[in-house]
Image (tube, rainbow, N blue to C red):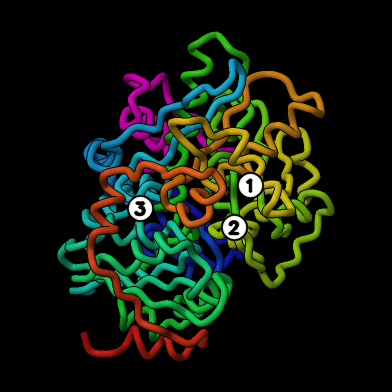
């Protein structure tokens, strides 16, 4: 399949776009509407089978077409189950991977694709900015893979203590930098590096943020699986509530709907950073400086994937029948939702709590049918915020416990594009 930059100046195959990450004109690669429909039905509703079924149209005629099944089998070795907390309200649990966050699905798929893609560079650099979870997922997916090094940037002091520990706990071919700035600074630095053609070629750069189709496409698999399971149970089409900051997971859900899956509506849930709700409410996109909330992975003032949304629907009013966004403006509301949704044997993370509160609001305003919230991360990653509030400890998943037992180190870095350039070109 051919994909085009959102800025119109670059066309590539899906395979080449995955290798490149960002388009050469600075835009984001995107297939044109209407999207192709998957053929027939998946072999089963197991996640690897759903993944290869829904992704097959994108890889038809591509160098990776014959390897797609093996890629899906290797990437999706853990499930994405829906747990119903009420008869018509469920949580799509996306935290069963090695770093306990939904980013594991896309990061592992991307790593499997790139490991099978030839490169002119003896050593490829996977450059990633993270607001908390992406960096650890990417680091885990590429850790100790021959031919790759990983450079992770995160905003110093703006991720949870356990997220910070994870990010610095890999070593070997992974180097982590704590940037004296916000996530938007980290994201700007990464985009500037990709826009510098000399730097891009010299360092062999590839992206693992949701600007990469290699991260975005596989995230359709779990939305498709959940929608098909709900359809098979005899329920009407589902409404998905998607906690989102950079709009990557939300856009993957939109792509799933555009492929004809039985999804009635998509409701994006944000924290007090309101760029996405304001875009959908006013039709005007205005990036702004982000500010901190306890749902830190969604502290994004300039969401990259807004560019994809506007490329498909320049008049975002055309999405009103199936897409909306709601902001949770105060940490007190997030804490209230954590308390309301957490039972004696479990808890939800602050980002999932935003989704839970948005789902309750949608129900109160008359939304009918099944609602499923994307549970984006395990609450144990945010123990410093959640445990004191609930007054009890949260059991740490084994994979996360292993990472937390390792020593951790992150190197300080200024929030200047030139400093990142120096890092990327320094002898290894």
Is there a contact, CB below 8 Å, between mark 3 and mark 2? no
Q: Quadrant of the C terminus?
A: bottom left
Q: Residue at x 49, y 38 (%)?
A: 347
Q: Which residue is mark 2?
A: 294
- Using a 10 Å C-alpha cutoff, classify the residue at mark 3 as few (fewer than 14 neighbours), some (14 to 19) or many (20 or more): many
Q: Which mark is residue 13?
A: none
Q: Secondary structure at mark 1?
A: helix
Would residue 1 be seen by someone viewing this image from the given angle? yes
Q: Residues within 10 Å of mark 2 (few under 14, many from 20)?
A: many
In the picture, residue 184 is in which quadrant?
A: bottom right
Residue 224: horizontal and vertical position, in percent?
Answer: 48, 30
How far apart in space, not on screen, are marks 3 and 2 (Cα)? 24 Å
Q: Earlier in the sequence, mark 2 or mark 1?
A: 2
Outermost residue, right side = 282
Residue 46 located within the stretch drawn in magenta: yes
Boundaries of the magenta span:
32-60
Per the image, the residue denoted by label 3 is 107
Place residue 267 in its image quadrant.
top right
């Amino acid at each position: 399949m051919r994909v085009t930059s959102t800025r119109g100046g670059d066309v590539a195959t899906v395979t080449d776009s995955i290798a490149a990450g960002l388009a050469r004109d600075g835009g984001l690669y995107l297939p044109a509407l209407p999207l192709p429909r998957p053929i027939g039905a998946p072999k089963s509703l197991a996640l690897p089978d759903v993944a290869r079924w829904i992704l097959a149209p994108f890889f038809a005629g591509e160098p990776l077409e014959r390897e797609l099944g093996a890629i899906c089998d290797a990437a999706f070795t853990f499930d994405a189950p829906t747990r119903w907390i009420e008869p018509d309200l469920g949580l799509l649990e996306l935290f069963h991977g090695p770093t306990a966050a939904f980013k594991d699905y896309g990061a592992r798929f991307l790593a499997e694709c790139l490991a099978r893609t030839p490169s002119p560079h003896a050593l490829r650099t996977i450059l990633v900015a993270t607001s908390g979870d992406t960096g650890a997922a990417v680091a885990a997916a590429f850790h100790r893979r021959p031919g790759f090094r990983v450079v992770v940037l995160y905003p110093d002091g703006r991720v949870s203590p356990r997220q910070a520990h994870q990010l610095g706990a890999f070593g070997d071919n992974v180097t982590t930098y704590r940037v004296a700035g916000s996530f938007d600074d980290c994201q700007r630095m990464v985009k500037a590096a990709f826009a510098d053609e000399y730097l891009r070629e010299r360092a062999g750069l590839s992206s693992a943020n949701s600007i990469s189709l290699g991260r975005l496409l596989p995230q359709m698999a779990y939305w498709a699986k959940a929608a098909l399971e709900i359809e098979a149970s005899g329920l009407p089409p589902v409404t998905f509530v998607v906690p989102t900051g950079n709009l990557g997971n939300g856009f993957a859900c939109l792509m799933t709907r555009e492929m004809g899956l039985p999804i009635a509506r998509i409701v994006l849930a944000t924290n007090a950073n309101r760029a996405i709700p304001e875009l959908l409410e006013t039709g005007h996109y205005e990036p702004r400086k982000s500010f901190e909330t306890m749902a830190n992975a969604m502290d994004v003032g300039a969401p990259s994937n807004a560019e994809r949304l506007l490329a498909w629907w320049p008049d975002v009013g055309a999405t009103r029948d199936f897409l909306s966004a709601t902001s949770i403006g105060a940490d007190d509301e997030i804490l209230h939702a954590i308390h309301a949704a957490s039972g004696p044997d479990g808890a939800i993370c602050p980002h999932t709590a935003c989704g839970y509160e948005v789902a309750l609001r949608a129900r109160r305003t008359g939304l009918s049918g099944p609602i499923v919230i994307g549970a984006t991360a395990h609450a144990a990653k945010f123990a410093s915020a959640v445990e004191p509030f609930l007054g009890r400890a949260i059991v740490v998943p084994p994979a996360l416990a292993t990472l937390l037992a390792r020593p951790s180190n992150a190197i300080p870095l200024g929030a200047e594009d030139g400093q990142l350039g120096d890092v990327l070109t320094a002898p290894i």
